[in-house]
Amino acid sequence: MCGIIGYIGKREAAPLILRGLHRLEYRGYDSAGIAIVSGEKLFAVKSAGMITALEARPELKRLIGNIGIAHTRWATHGEPTEQNAHPHLDCKGEIAVVHNGIIENYMELREALQKRGHTFNSETDSEVIAHLIEESYEGVLEDAVARALKLLEGTFGLAVVHTGERKVVAVRRSSPLIIGIGQDEMFVASDVAAVVEHTSRVVHLDDDEIACIRQDGFSVMRLSGEMVEKRVDKVEMSLSQIEKKGFKHFMLKEIFEQPASITNLLRGRLKDGKITLTPNLGLARFERVIFVGCGTSWHSAIIGRYLAENLAGIRAEFEYASEFRYRKPIVTNRDLVVVISQSGETADTLGALREAKKRGARTLGIVNVVGSTISREVDGGIYLHAGPEIGVASTKAFTSQVMALLLLTLYIRQERGLENDPELIREAAAMPAKINAMLDNLDVIKNIAREFASYKNFIYLGRGINYPVALEGALKLKEISYIHAEGYPAGEMKHGPIALIDDGFPVVFIVGNDAQHEKVLGNMQEVKARKGRIIAVCSEGDTDAARVADYCITVPQTSPLLSPILNVVPLQLLAYYVADAKGLDVDRPRNLAKSVTVE
Ligand code: M6R
C-alpha cells in the first residue's frame, strides 16, 4: 500500500519524481524518502510525515542526478519514523531499494544476514532486500535482484538502483507496477497517475517479471530467466482528471463528479430498453452468483445480492473477500463469482478471485482502474469508467458500482428471456440528473454537519436494499471524521443497539420509499420514544418521515432498486462536512491508504 516511483533520463530526477510521488500519496502518507544516483555516488533523504515534510528538508538541494527512486509509505513493519522510511540502502551505500508489499520471511533473513555481518538501520521487513541484493551482486544489477528474489517470500513491487550502473531495476509480485515510456526517459511507478504528466504509453508488469529500465528503453525477463515481449498500453487518464479543479478536497470533487461518472458507466450499455455488456460470458447458465469485495465494495456486494435475487431471480450470496479466500468455499463451474474493487488491486479481493478460479468458478470483475491486476485476471468484466478516485473515502466508485450491478443483474434477466421493466430503465437513465439536482442545495446538510460535528457516536439504520447504505454512511463518517459510527439493519436495533439511545446519540435513518417504509417509520418512533435525535434521509414528499425526524434530508423519488444511489449522496456529504468542520485532512485520513495491497 505504499507508492513507489523511479526515473532515468536526461532531466533532474529529484523534482520530477517528487511531483510524481505526490500523485501516489493516496497509497500511504506516513513517511517518505528519495535516493538519487549522482555520478558514482548515491544520496538519500528520508523524512517522517507527508511528502511536504520531505520537501522541506534542506539536504534535498544536494540531490543532483538523472537517476532516482522515491517512496511514500503506509507502515506495516516498524513505526512511521525517518529511520524506517524508504529507500533502504545496503551496507556500502551503493544500492538503494524502495518496496511496496510485505516480506513474510524477513525475520529469518535478517538474522542470517546479521550473522554474516550486515548492519541494519531500520525495523522494516524491506531492508533485507537491499542486503540480499548486496550479497548477490556480481556486476549486473538485474541478475543480483533475480538471485535475491529467490529467497524472498511475500509480496513486492520494487525499484532498485546501483551507483555503478545507469539503470533502474523493477520487479513485481502481487504489488502493482507500471513502466512509463517517455521521450529519452523512462519511469517506473505503482500507478499511472504518477507518470501521466510525462507520457501516455505504459507497460503493466506481471507477477515475477523483472524489468531493466534504461534511458532509451527497457527489457523484461521472468524470474526463470526467459525474456518477455510486453505490450505497450495507451493511458486513458488525463492530467486534469487527477487535479482538484478548485474543489477544497478530492473527496468533494469526486462526490460532485457522480452525475458524470454514472453517465460514463451507462454510455453504450443502455439502449432502447436493452442492456449491452461485453464480453458475453453466457451469464444465463449460472446457478448462483457470489459477490465479494472489501470495505465500500463489500457494501456494493450486499446490494448485488439484493438486485440479483430481485431482478435476475438467481441464487445469490455476498461475502467479505478476506473471509472468502480463507474458507473452503464450495464453488463450482456453475457459479459466477463477481469481484468488486475500485482499485482492482486490493490484496484480499485479488486473493478471493484467485481462490474462486482455483475452485473452478467463472469470474467477473466490476473494477474502476483500467489495466489493474484484478481487471486482467478475471474471465470478464465491467469497467466503471468513473475516472481516478483519489480521496481515500470511496464515493463515486460506490454509486457506479451499484449502477454496474443493476446493469449486470438486468442483463442476466434479459439473458434468461425475461422482460426488463421500462420504468426501471428510464429511472436508471435519469440518475445523473437527479444527483445533480441534489448537489444544487447543500445548506441543509451543511447545517446538520455543523450541529453534530462534536458528537462522539452515531448509528445509521436502514432496511432491505438500504441497509448496506446505512453501513456505507457509517463507514464514510468513521473513516474521515474519526467519529464512532455503526451501521445496522433497522429491524435489528431492538435486539441490542437500542440500549445506546439517549438524547446524546444521533440516529441516521435511511427511509426507503418501498415495502418496508412503514416498518422503518416504526423504528423511528422507537428511537424517538427514547429521546434519540433523528436525522432522516427520505424521499421528497415523505411527510410521515419528516414529521417524526428532527432533521430531514430529502432526495428525489426513484425506484426502490435505485434508491441506494440517491440515498448515499447526502451521507457522503454529511461525512465530508463533519470532517471538514473538524479541520481534518479529509483526503488523507489517519492510518488509512487508498489502495490496500496487503492482507
Ligand atoms: O479498491 P477497492 O474497492 O478494492 O477498496 C476496498 C476498500 O479498501 C475501500 O472501499 C475502503 O473501504 C474505502 N476507504 C472506503 O471508503
Image (cartoon, rainbow, N blue to C red):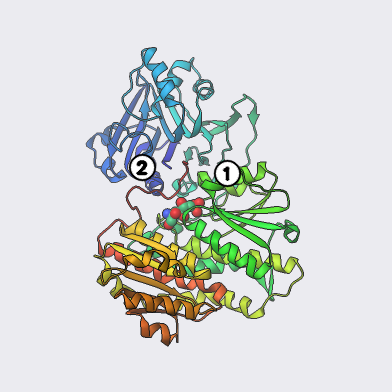
Expressed as whole percent of the image width and height from the top left, the position of residue 287 reads 72, 58
Dot placed on the residue nearer the N-terminal end, 1 or 2: 2
Q: How many marks overall?
A: 2
**Whether residue 389 can be seen here:** yes
Report the residue marked by disc 1: 327
Q: Is residue 207 left or right of residue 8?
A: right
Could you say which quadrant of the image residue 203 lies in?
Answer: top right
Q: Secondary structure at mark 2?
A: helix
Looking at the image, which residue is at 54% across and 49% down? 321
Report the residue marked by disc 2: 18
Quarter containing the N terminus: top left
Looking at the image, which residue is at 36% across and 56% down? 479
Q: Secondary structure at mark 1?
A: loop
**Whether residue 276 can be seen here:** no
Expressed as whole percent of the image width and height from the top left, the position of residue 163 reads 40, 23
Expressed as whole percent of the image width and height from the top left, the position of residue 78 reads 33, 34
Measured along the vertical axis of the image, is residue 360 above or below residue 141?
below
